[in-house]
Image: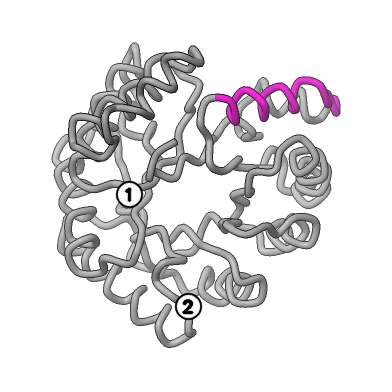
Amino acid sequence: MSNITIIAERINMTRKKMRERIWERDIDFVVNEVKKQEHMGATHIDINAGGDPSKEVEDMIWLTELVSKATELPISFDSANPDALKAGLEICNRPGTIINSITGEKSRIENTLPLVIEYNTHAIALTMDDNGMPPDLDARIRVVDNLVVLMKENNISLDRIHMDTLVQPVSSNPEQVAYTIAGIKYIHENYPEMHTMVGLSNVSYGVPRRIHMNRAFFVLLIQAGLDGAIIDNTADGMLGAMLATLAMLGKDEYCMDYISAARTEKI
């Protein structure tokens, strides 16, 4: 539908309702969530099985088996646990599969990067390292450049990397929005073959009626060149905001994607 990678985020066991339904092994509930996200334009289905670290591998196996049968879309495996990632990848590693995520942290490089290499997947790379969250644009750029060097050293093509310049809540860190946007522009100007990614909803943490913040931020990011987002693509107006923005930027010829989505009542 668009040139933006849409990683649909609802199969996430850090959410209480989702966690409870998965532990109940509610097959119909999970499959319905997958189908709904696919219908609304997802390009990937994210799986986060981190409801309980002691059961993450078991839950990842159950979810991957179920989700991979419910859709032909590639999966984004969301975990800091390499055992959980490997368990999912052993079951389903389609073209376009994403590991979420690697960072510049020594432990992630040692534990997760080998899986990207072994399974030849894409990866979301967060612009953070052992110094923690980047406080400003310069810190983000430094981590981006270091991660690019790391990818090249390991013969990982940059078109397999989705660089996340990190989103922080606008309610407590308003200056961070500008750094995120500037980071996206820096990546596309300096590493045009590499993709960009954000965990969009972090921007609205701590404010009421979060959907308005999320939609507005999505529009700004697309204008800056964003080509990937981890979002709830079923949320009110998110898909419509994306398609309208792409049309106005001349990235949807004759508004055909927008019109098609309207005709099929996706927006």
Q: Is residue 261 left or right of residue 46?
A: left
Residue 170 magenta-highlighted:
no
Tell me the magenta residue range: 24-39
Q: Is residue 60 above or below residue 262?
A: below
Q: Nearer the viewer, residue 178 or 53?
A: 178
Badge 2: how crowded within 10 Å, few (<14), some, or many (20+)? some
Q: Secondary structure at mark 2?
A: loop
| Amino acid type, callout 2 | Ile
What's the residue at 23%, 48% (across, down)? Answer: 225
Magenta segment main secondary structure = helix
Name the residue beneath numbered marker 2.
156
Q: Is residue 189 left or right of residue 168?
A: left
What's the residue at 26%, 57% (across, down)? Answer: 134
Residue 106: give x, y in percent of width and height: 47, 75
Name the residue beneath numbered marker 1.
166
Image quadrant assignment for residue 67: top right
Q: Residue furthest bottom?
A: 153
Q: Is residue 29 above or below residue 83?
A: above
| Amino acid type, callout 1 | Leu
Q: How many marks?
A: 2
* Coloring scheme used: one colour
